[in-house]
Structure formats: structure tokens, C-alpha cells
Image: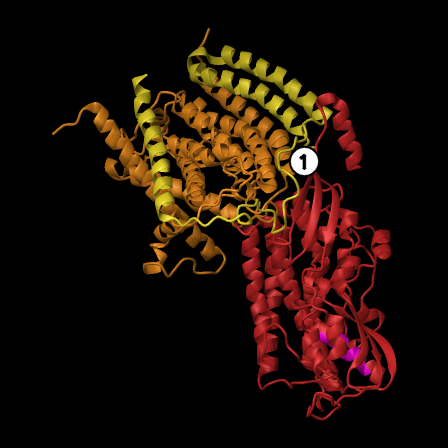
Chain colours: A yellow, B orange, C red
Amino acid sequence: MSAYLPVAIFAAFIVAFAVVSLAVAWLLRPSRPDPVKLMNYECGAEPIGSAWVQVPLGFYLVALIFIVFDTLAVFMIPWALVLRTAGLPAFWVMAGFVGIIGLGWLYAYREGVLEWK
Amino acid sequence: MTLPPIAQTAVAAFVLLNVVIGLVTYVTLLERKFAARMQSRIGPYYVGPHGLLQPIADALKLMMKEDVVPSSADRWVYNLAPIAFLVPCVLIFATLPFAPGLGLADLNIGVLFFLAVSSLEIVGLFMGGWGSNNKYAMLSAMRGVNQIISYDLPFVFAALVPVVLAGSLQLSAIVTAQQGLWFAAYPVIGQLGFIAYLVATLAAENRVPFDILEAESELVAGFRVEYSGMKFALIQLGEYAHIIATSYLGALLFLGGWLGPGPAWLGAGWFTLKAMLVFLLLTWVRWSFVRIRVDQILAISWKLMLPATVLLLLVTAFWVAWRSGGGA
Amino acid sequence: MADAEARKVIEMGYGGNERLAMNMGPQHPSAHGVFRAILTLEGETVVGVDAVIGYLHRCHEKLGESLTYVQYPSIASKTDYVAAMTAELAYVAAVEKVGKIEVPKRAQYLRVLAAELQRIASHCLWLGTWCLDMGGALGGGATVFLYCIREREGVLDLFEALTGARLLYGFHQVGGVRYDVPAGWTQNVRETLDLIDSRVDEYEAMLEGNAFFLVRTQGVGTISRELAMDVGISGPLIRGSGVNYDVRRAEPYSSYEDFDFKVPVETAGDCYARYRVRMQEFRESIKICRQVLDGLPEGPISSRPGVKSVGQVRVAKGEGYTRVEGARGEIGAYIVADGGPKPYRLKWRGASFSNLSILPHILIGTKVADVVAIMGSVDPVFGEVDR
């Protein structure tokens, strides 16, 4: 795990940078709030209701397909590393796996899931 | 005087952070000058000689701007979003080797780390969009999540092409594997992979023609419409850091990283030059195209880019497996 | 259609879609002026549009009643401030019709020249802002915008040399025009026209070879021929829907019958068709301008002596309507005169106002991104809508 120590230190520095720069800005900046200024921007008119609404579900189906293909990516990464030693048999196994997922992709395509609703 | 290893690492991390921030601020100037040239303008000119101090003036200005937090926003989410957005965007620089041995952490799963961390930006993005309680920000965040998860896959598969060719996820090993020939020069596979990588990059970075989540003519400024002052600056910083990191990765995966004529110490220069070329290529596209619509973007990803990159990866893999002739 | 789709999604059993009512405008980067559209959205799809206009109302018709025939033409230019020349022309033509005032041939030709140069300038601005709407201020749209503005500047420089003003000219007056061409001006016009002619080719090459531009415009915001006729749109919009209607041809005014030009018509009715119509109009306008310069007759520029007092022009009792083809369509002015130095009543027909009424018919069922593309292709100027 020691290889990740620099990464952790770097991440800590980034957070520190963000916090410090926000703090400096907090010291420097003016602050003159008023109710109209703090209103949400909606092109100069008063906002109509809240923005927190449920959104349509085309999104949800896309997310499901994403998970399927992300799994494919997860399997492909170690496979890519051992390909040289495992050779053609490993390739054919993965090709078969991709073929099966490809059938699922074809089905989703035919069902129109890949369209944004 | 020798510092203990942990202090050395800390110094290296501090230097890298400063390099990244300096690079990002000046790349904005580069882009503005480049865009100005394309549009027969001059661009920033008055602050410093030829506008060279413009990024610093911008940073100072943003720092001294009033910070307006909408009264109906979700304050915690809203205030944390810039940090959540910035951290992964800058963190991906950690694994980039700028020259042999000149990198913060040459992880043995460098590519995977890069891909994983770089897509974490959507967390901050969605926090910003949701926390603002603004309809434009909300629509933008929804679009953003949709777009980024859609283009993550082509991005991953395109980035796996060099991994298959090199047989390693370690970034320095991928560069070493290109000593004979850059991967972009491999017939057909290399070029297609590079193009797919560039297109996926444009989409993953929300650049025109895929900048539907910024979409200032529809959604005004997208998820950062309610941000002002330093928080806005952090988001911008993160976004540009992400673009530059991805340009570096592109230069590393396909254009041979630090490889180039001349002595070894020129490596970082070569690498930066190549990364800037990739960046200017993306900028050139940005300033030439109009934006496409959200449904068209998703259609391009799921119907064209995804199957194409998977097929490309399989073809590459077949070639590698067949050439190596290993296995049972 | 959108409703049916929405119902289908609900029936899938994941719960309902809440609708989101959102203001688009009055301060929106792509509202061409102060226009407020209250969009009802389901996700990204527009299911309802309410248009709110009137933010730029300046009582133009009342102003027309209280200002004399000498004073008002320069105010008329403020209705459609992007194409001020044609708005002035509509007013003075109406006064001349009611008052039966002759206009010398040279003045008529100069009016045509001004109107066509104005059309070029206006279309330049339209193309730039429309691409800005689709491509964004931080993308290719800004590039096209800056190119177009560069060409528009050329035309505005010509107007500045002619009238001293760059946006609102006061060039027309009842009975003719106010300024004759300065020395060397016609040569400048020719050079500018040649430049724009070549630049229009560049824009076409840049946009029509661009797949992203095509997918954003083709099949978007389709107006059928019947709908176009029913709603009463005019100008490039109706010509993009396959109706061959142009006031310059249907009812020639100001010697338009002397010139040889084509009225471009496209049948598709989508944003791309409207774009094509306007691009061809660039060329036709350039053609007309060249013919004017070739055939510019000598003679007086006004049938009336110079202006000495603001109440100098009196029009006998009567009423009349004239229409001219502005850059955005048919601009009409209806005047009721009572014998005094001011009209009793002035009624404007703004092309943008009529064209804007097409929006609720074509926006339903489109995506948010298409709203701005369609609005840009309609090319409204809110000075003319609200008056």
C-alpha cells in the first residue's frame, strides 16, 4: 500500500489548497447579501417552485446498461494484462463473453432503450 | 541534508500541486489566445506584456468577488461541491510520469487509477447541480451524469487499446513499450484508437460539441450557474485540470509520452509539448463546432462509440494474442 | 405526442414524472432581447410553452400619433433596431401613399439599396446569433458570430458614411431620402459586397459541411406549409415552408419591379430550410445592390424641399396601409391621417411579432436545446415585437 502514500498526501494537499483558497477569499471578499440577491437565478424572473423534482426514467435504463458494460470493462482489464501469456484461447473466451453481452446490447437497441426519452 | 522519505514525498506533492495549478492557469491563457487567433481577434492583451498576466488578474478578481449562496440552496452540498469536484480532477496528475522516474506515484495500475478517479468528478458535479436548487443547474447535472457515464465506457475501452498493446497498466511501462513505434502509428488500430480516445475525451470533459451540461445558450452555465467567486474558480480549475490531465494521458498512451530526440532531461518538455498538441486539437474542435443535442450525444455513445471501441479492443487483442502465440 | 410518450413511461410502473416549470428569459443568454418563455418540461422535453412579451414596449403607436411626419421616421427605426432602414421605409411609404406624394427615381433606388444592405447586415447578425445559440458563446458558435459581426461592421461602416449613424439612421423622409451618396461611396459599397459575397461562401462551407450543424438543424422545428399559412408568418420563415411569398415580388414598391432577383424558396420547413433561404437571400440582396449601383439614376433625392420646421409635412385626410419586405418578413404601417402634421392613428405590423406566434405550435415535444435553435431560426427582434 505504500505506493499509495504519495497519492494520499497529494489528495490532502489538494483539499488543503481548496480550503485555504476559500478561506483567503472569505477574508478578502465583500459580503452584502440581500434577499433578492440570494434568490435563485432563473433568468431574472422569480423562480417557479423548487428545482428538486423527480426526473424521467430514460436515465435509469441507461444507468442499468452502464453497469452491464462497466462489468465488461472490469473483466477486460485483467484480461488485457495476461493476454500475451494466455494467448488465443483467452481471446476466444473473452470474444464469447462480449458476444453474449452484445446480444443484450442488440436487444436494448431493438427495444429502444438507448434513445433518450 | 536529506529529508526523511515522507517529507520528500510531501515536497514532491507540493511541487506537483503548484505545477498543476500554474499549468492550468496558463493553459487558460493559451486557449484564449488560440481561440482569439481562430476568430481573428487578439485575445487578452492589456494585463502584462501581451496579456501574460491575465490569468493572475483573473484569479485575483475571482478571489475578491462576493460569494453568493442562494438562500434556498442545500448549503452543505453546495459548499462542498467545488472541493469534491476539484480533488479528483487534480488527483489524476498523481500517477502521470512526466519523465522517467519523474512522477509522484508510478502505480502499477496507473491507467485504471486514472480512469477510476477521473470519473469521480461527476460526484462533485452532481452535488453542485443538485445543491444549487436551480433548474438550469439541475438539468445540467442530470445531463452531465448521463453523458459522463455514457462516455466513460468508450473512454475506458479506447484507453485499454494501448494497455493491450503494451500488456501493462503501468504508465511508465506503456511509454517504454512505445520505444520502437508510437501506438498512434500502429496501422489502423492506433489511429482508430486515438480518434476514439479524442472523441471520448471531448465528451468526458464536456467540451463543445459535447458541452451540453455547460450549454450557456440553453442552461446559462449549467451546474455552476449559482457559483461565484472562489468556488467558481475552483470548479473552473478542476475542469481545466481534468482536460489537461486527459491530454497528458492521451499523449502518453498514443504519442509515446516523454519519448523524443535529445537528452533524457528533455523528456518532460516533449511530453508537455505533445500534451499541449492534444489539448490544442481538442480546442480546435471546440471552437469550430456547434453543440449537439443531448439525445444525439447519447445515441452517438451507445449506438456507435461503444460497439466500435469494444470491437476495436477485440481486434487489437486478437492481433496481440495471435502475435505472441502464447497459451496452451 | 409527447404526452403519449410520457404516459407510456408512467405506465411502465416506476412512478410519475414531475413537470418542471422553468423561466427562460427575460435575462437569458439566448433570448434575442427580452423575451420570457415559461417552459413546462418533463425531463428535457418541452410539453408546454407560455410566451410573455412586452418587456420592451415603448408606446410606438402612440409616439407615432404624437410626433409629426417629419419627426417620426427616425423613431420608426427603433421598432426593428436590427434592420432600421426597412422600418423607416414602411412608415414613409405609408405616409406617401396616403398623401399621394411622389418619390423621385433616384430616391427610390437609394431606398432599395439601403434596404438590401440592411437585409445583409441583419442576416449577418441573425446567422451569428443563431450559431451562438446552438454552438454556445464558448464554442464554434462564437467563431461564426465573430466572423458575421466582422461582415456586418462593413455594412454599418457604409451606413455611417451615408447617414452618420450606425444603428438607427433616420435616412428616409417623406418624399424621398435625406442624404445623397457621398463621394466614392459607391465604390466602397461594391468592394464590401464583393467581400461579403466571398465570405458567404466561407460560411456555407463551414456550416454545411459540418455534421453537427446538420443534425442540429435538419428536421428541427418543422413548420408545415398549412401551418405557416394559418399562423400568418412571413419573410424567410414562410419561404422556408414552401410558400413563394415576398412583398417585393407580390406587391412591388420603391421600384423593385426594375430589378432582377430570385425569391428563394425551400420546402422542408425546418431550421435548415430557413437557414438556406436566408443564405440565398444574402446572394440575392448582393445582386440587387449591384443592379442599383449600375442603374442609379441622376436627379433629386427628394420630391420635397429641405426640412424647415417639424410641422412642414401635412397629409390630407385619408388612410392607407403599406407593406415592405423587411429582413424578418412583412413590415406594415397603417396610417389614418386627419389633415394635420401628425397622423391620427398609426398601426404597426411587426414581422417578428407575427413570426413569434409560430413558437407554441412548433416547440411542443422538442428538447430544451431545440428551443433555442428554433427561436434563433425564427429570428425575432423584440423591439419590433413589443414596439
The magenta-colored residue range is: C88-96
Q: Which residue is mark 1?
A: C43
| The quadrant where residue A95 appears | top right
Density class for disc 1 (Cα within 10 Å; few <14, some 14-19, many ≥20) is many
Q: Position of residue C118 (x, y in %)?
A: 66, 71
| The quadrant where residue C10 appears | top right
Q: Position of residue A98 (x, y in %)?
A: 58, 17
Q: Chief secondary structure of the magenta span?
A: helix
Left/right of residue C226 with respect to residue C196 in the rendered view? right
Q: Secondary structure at mark 1?
A: loop
Nearer to the camera, C283 or B11: B11
Asked if residue C255 can be seen in this view, the reply is no
Farthest left residue in view: B1
Q: Quadrant of the N terminus of chain B?
A: top left
Identity of the residue drawn at 31% across and 40% down: B19
Nearer to the camera, A4 or C184: A4
For residue C334, above or below residue B315: below
Asked if residue B7 can be seen in this view, the reply is yes
For residue C304, above or below residue B257: below
Left/right of residue C381 with respect to residue B182 in the rendered view? right
Identity of the residue drawn at 57% across and 30% down: B150
Left/right of residue B108 with respect to residue C345 in the rendered view? left
Nearer to the camera, C284 or B243: B243
Identity of the residue drawn at 67% across and 28% down: A58
Farthest top residue in view: B328
Left/right of residue B273 with respect to residue C23 in the rendered view? left
Mark 1, chain letter?
C
Q: Position of residue C366 (x, y in %)?
A: 72, 42
* Amino acid residing under circle 1: Gly
Q: Reply yes or no: does residue C149 show up in magenta.
A: no
Q: Position of residue B295 (x, y in %)?
A: 65, 36
Q: How many marks?
A: 1
